[in-house]
Image (tube, helix red, strand yellow):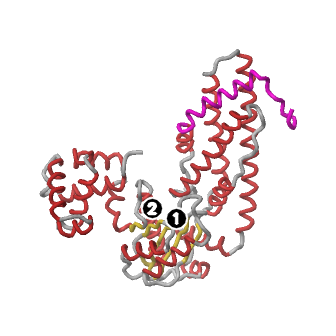
Amino acid sequence: MKHGWAAPSPEVAAHIRATAERLQGTLDELLAEIGQQLAPDTPEAPIDPVMAEEIAASNRDTVGRWVRANRLRPGDPVPADLTAQILDVARDMVRRGVDERYLVQGYWRGHNLLWRYWMRAALAEPGPPEVLSAALDLAARSMSRFVDRTLAGVQKHVEHERDQLVGGMPARRLETVNLLLQGAPIAEERASTRLGYDLSRRHLAVVLWQAPGMTEQGELESAADAIAEAAGARRPLTVAAGISVLWAWIADPGQPDTGVLDEALAATGTTVHAATGMPGDGPTGFRLSHQQALTAQRLMFRMHRPPRLTAYEDVQVVALAAHDEDQAREFVASTLGALAEASPELARTLRVYLQEDCNASRAARRLYTHRNTVLNRIARADALLPRPRPGRGLQVGVALELQHWLGPRR
């Protein structure tokens, strides 16, 4: 007996181990359903692909830890899951101002789904009814204890983090930024004073991020400084939106060239990715430019190999056209026909050709190939279209952009 926890009989332990092994085969399906159940459904919840990745990794760690423990040591108490990854996600949610109820509900929704899958796996295992009953009883107590203790540890960390933030400059800055982004009625002069940043000017918003676990101290801030300098502006206003995410605003950026900003980001030698909005004036421009940067970021996350930096201006049409994804995909299929399933090289060549106003020489330079090669590919691509391209260049161009940015259906 461990700390009042009675050890199971060999038969019950074997049943628990077999159930855990069976459940291991459906873990991806379970985690996908947990992700859908925990999808942000409140105004406070963050719509952020980086945080979504961090939460998914946290879910995988927590669920996998309990299942793995019951495979290796069936029936033993499972220690609380309080890894740095779990606590970092909780801290990020506090900084975003997410209601703690969302965190608590998330753990218990995950618990309920895990228990449903566990029961299904347990009932599929052969054995006497009394063994099944004892195994289910022990698993239920173990799972509830694990979630209870993990959640208690996370809530304690959240309280500590909130105490650390209250009254500090980072907390006031983040609070003010969140109010501005929500369109709350905060006086422009007061907000400018709290931020140390003049909101009456013109703003270019930038969202910078790295893959979870890849962030080195100061890399995101250095990348933001490099982009601001390339835009011909002073040091930007920055807010840490998470361990791996930084929000930035550049004042009076002029007319930033995406290529120049991309080169500046590349020169930092980091793995930072960035998305920019369009310059806008005053508090409204501050908010809209940030929303545009987030939209560009979400499109980048759909790609297998996203570019290092994307400007909303370059994906604006795609963002609008893809508002209803199912309809957007139907449009791509009907407009491109066989070209949608052909060699990606043909679609890419036609896309660049249309972007260059049907100038084969300029397209060839961008594609690092010969002009005749471009013309040959264009002819092959045109032959695959269901209807002739002349007079339908706009539709074909939009379909190619949608196909490029949406990628395969997930």
Q: Which of 160 and 220 is in front in this view?
A: 220
CB within 8 Å, label 2 to label 1: yes
Give the Cα separation between the discs numbered 2 and 1. Answer: 9 Å
Q: Which disc number belongs to residue 297? A: 2
Q: Which amino acid does label 2 sit on?
A: Gln
| For residue 301, above or below residue 291 | above
Q: Where is the C terminus found, in terms of image quarters?
A: top left
Along the horizontal axis of the image, is 187 left or right of 338? right
Q: Position of residue 153 (x, y in %)?
A: 75, 51
Q: Where is the N terminus found, in terms of image quarters?
A: top right
| For residue 232, above or below residue 148 | below
Along the horizontal axis of the image, is 175 left or right of 36? right
Q: Position of residue 244 (x, y in %)?
A: 57, 63
Q: What residue span does the magenta drawing correspond to?
A: 1-29
Q: Which amino acid does label 1 sit on?
A: Trp
Is residue 14 rendered magenta in the image? Answer: yes
Give neighbour class at mark 2: few <14, some 14-19, many 20+ (Cα, 10 Å).
Answer: many
Residue 305, by quadrant, is bottom left
Give neighbour class at mark 1: few <14, some 14-19, many 20+ (Cα, 10 Å).
Answer: many
| For residue 101, above or below residue 276 | above
| Mark 1 lies on residue | 209
Sequence-first disc among 2 and 1:
1
Viewer-nearest of labels 2 and 1? Answer: 1
Q: Where is residue 68 in the image (x, y as percent from the top left)?
A: 67, 38
Residue 377, by quadrant, is bottom left
Instruction: Report the magenta stretch's main SS.
Output: helix
Instruction: Label 1: state its secondary structure.
Output: strand
Instruction: Label 2: state its secondary structure.
Output: helix
Residue at x-position 39% and y-position 68%: 311
